[in-house]
Image: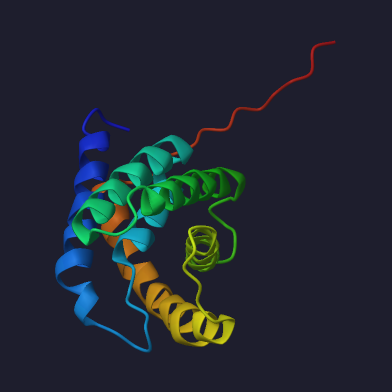
Amino acid sequence: MSALDPLKAGGLVLLAALVQISLAEWIEIGEAHPDVVLVTLVAVSLLRGPMYGSVLGFLAGLVLDTASFGTFGLTSLLLTVIGYATGRFGEATTRSSAHPLLIAVALASIGFTLGSAVLHFMLGVSIPASQLFLAVLLPGLAFNLLLAYPLYALCARILPPSLVVRREVKPAV
């Protein structure tokens, strides 16, 4: 890791937020939009760990909350938790695991949608379950899974994966 990695990661997430706000909102199936910020956050969290994930999740949520004039702090809270959890998931899995990126993006998309629905319900805004699952969750999940590998490749090119050197531990006798 270099000293510029935090700036590169922050720039990636801010660029993703700009694309999310300006372009991705125009693409729609059902009531779902591709979540460029979420997929970028998952990719950076898998590459750099939970600390980067939680800080960048809060930053991205703050930018999205400010730009959308929605409930301030809701997206920040959800993306902070998702960034941290994805970073921990990345530390727990190996590079040889079967498709950890797709698993992480799917879990993050489901967690973000359900977490948002629960928090909105607690704030007094409800949505029918059929509409939540059929019009929001499933199309959004499909969008995010399609974006997963291209965005991960971009993030891995800008933030190359750090090589973990494993040392053999010899028991003391």
User: Would residue 101 be seen by someone viewing this image from the given angle?
Assistant: no
Which picture quadrant has residue 97? bottom right
Could you tell whether 114 is left or right of 156 in the image? right
Q: Is residue 155 left or right of residue 89?
A: left
Residue 33, quarter of the rendered image: bottom left
Marks counted in the figure total 0
Image spot of residue 118 (x, y percent): 55, 62
| Image-based side of 75 in relation to 127, left or right | left
x, y percentage for residue 59? Answer: 29, 43
Q: Is residue 165 visible?
A: yes
Is residue 46 or residue 117 the one in the foreground?
Answer: 117
Instruction: Give the x, y percent position of residue 138.
Output: 49, 82
The single residue placed furthest to the right in the displayed view is 173
Residue farthest to the top? 173
Residue shown at 43% from the left, 74% from the top: 145
In the picture, the quarter occupied by the N terminus is top left
Viewer-closest of 54 and 135: 135
| Up/down of 166 relative to 22, above or below | above
Q: Position of residue 71 (x, y in %)?
A: 34, 55
Q: Residue at x 54, y 82 (%)?
A: 128
